[in-house]
Image (tube, grey):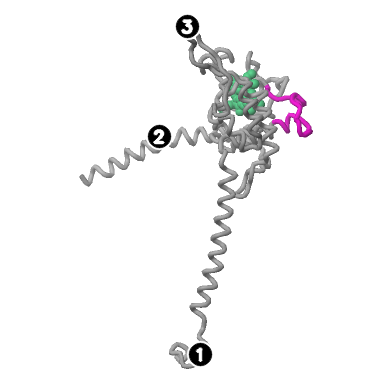
Amino acid sequence: MTRSIPKRFLAGLGVLLGLALPQTDRARAETTQPLPHQHWDFEGPFGQYNQKSLQRGFLIYDHICSNCHGLSNLTYNDLLDIGLNSQDIAALAHSKMLAGPPDTTGQPTQRPALPDDHFRAPFPSDAIAAAMMGGVAPPDQSRMVAIHSNGPDWLYAVLTGYKIPSPPGAPVVPGKFYNTAVNGHLIGMPPPLMDGMIQYPDGTPSTLAQQARDITEFLAWASDPHRNARTRIGLWCMLYLAFMLVLAMAWKHRIWKKPDKPGNAETEQ
Ligand code: HEC
């Protein structure tokens, strides 16, 4: 009994190290190039998403990224949180066709989406997506920013990291594009953004860098939509606790105040 415990402990440690080593290797490979840090409205303990940037980011997603990437965790109604109104959301959903129930002869049908439907996936399956995209399926973007370390900086770096034509001496692989931010510097995604490729209704200049910032803010929100509420609640909790601290200090002061009445046992000592 007593000898089996260290053995078990060592076995457990072995498993832990086995799991831990590839992790650290991966982390090291990911961080070989330090990512330039960008300033984000939503970072820090009191950070909040910028609604205007979220709306511009959604425009980029809807017009560009959604042709290849799904965003399956969102429903059209979730866009109420970034300031879209219910009529616009209903019209937007109505313009997207989803698979409907088979008709009476068993033929597949299509129906317009409803506000409660999840965002339409661009491909019927990952296998079809991979076949159409030169072997690699574009990953779903629901958790894209959350699962990468420094997710927002990483996404911004990928979107702004294309070099076309590729620098002299760089490997040229058909169907792959040179990008300074990805491992091996080759990615199967054609550069999705370009200066002026979309008109912003709020008049913001539509540079590639601005588009990259807005889509990053939007996808950061999609990965963590409750962040604004969380930081707001956190702030109120801190204010409440600070208020209680002041009360507690005043109370303590009152209880332990030096008695000024002569005749008290403690003052006579
Ligand atoms: C024409 C189709 C297409 C469009 C449009 C597109 N992508 Fe991609 N994307 C891909 C493919 C294919 C991959 C997989 C490439 C690979 O792994 O080499 C990919 C991969 C990515 C990756 C890397 C994922 C990872 O984990 O390495 C990011 C980030 C990304 N896309 C973001 C975007 C954003 C943001 C947009 C919209 C601005 C967008 N993509 C538009 C096809 C597309």
Q: Which residue is mark 3?
A: 105
Residue at image x 56%, y 33%? 30
Position in image of residue 202 (x %, y %):
76, 34
**Which is the main secondary structure of the residues drawn in magenta?**
loop
* Kind of residue at disc 3: Thr
Position in image of residue 22 (x %, y %):
46, 32
Few, some or many C-alpha atoms within 10 Å of disc 2 (few <14, some 14-19, many ≥20)? few
* Kind of residue at disc 2: Gly
Label pair 3/1, CB-CB below 8 angstroms: no
Ligand number 1: quarter of image? top right
Depth check, mark 2 against mark 1: the one in front is 1
Secondary structure of the residue carrying tag 1 is: loop
Earlier in the chain: of badge 3 and badge 2, it is 2
Depth check, mark 3 against mark 2: the one in front is 3
Few, some or many C-alpha atoms within 10 Å of disc 3 (few <14, some 14-19, many ≥20)? few
Q: Which residue is mark 2?
A: 18
Position in image of residue 204 (x %, y %):
77, 34
- What is the distance, in whole Å, between disc 3 and disc 2 at their CAs? 55 Å
Relative depth, front residue between 165 and 206? 206
- Which span of residues is magenta-colored? 191-211
Residue 185 visible in rendering = no
The C terminus, quarter of image: bottom left
Label pair 3/2, CB-CB below 8 angstroms: no
- What is the distance, in whole Å, between disc 3 and disc 1 at their CAs? 98 Å
Q: Is residue 203 magenta?
A: yes
Q: Is mark 3 within 8 Å of ligand 1?
A: no
Secondary structure of the residue carrying tag 3 is: loop
Give me the disc on residue 261.
1
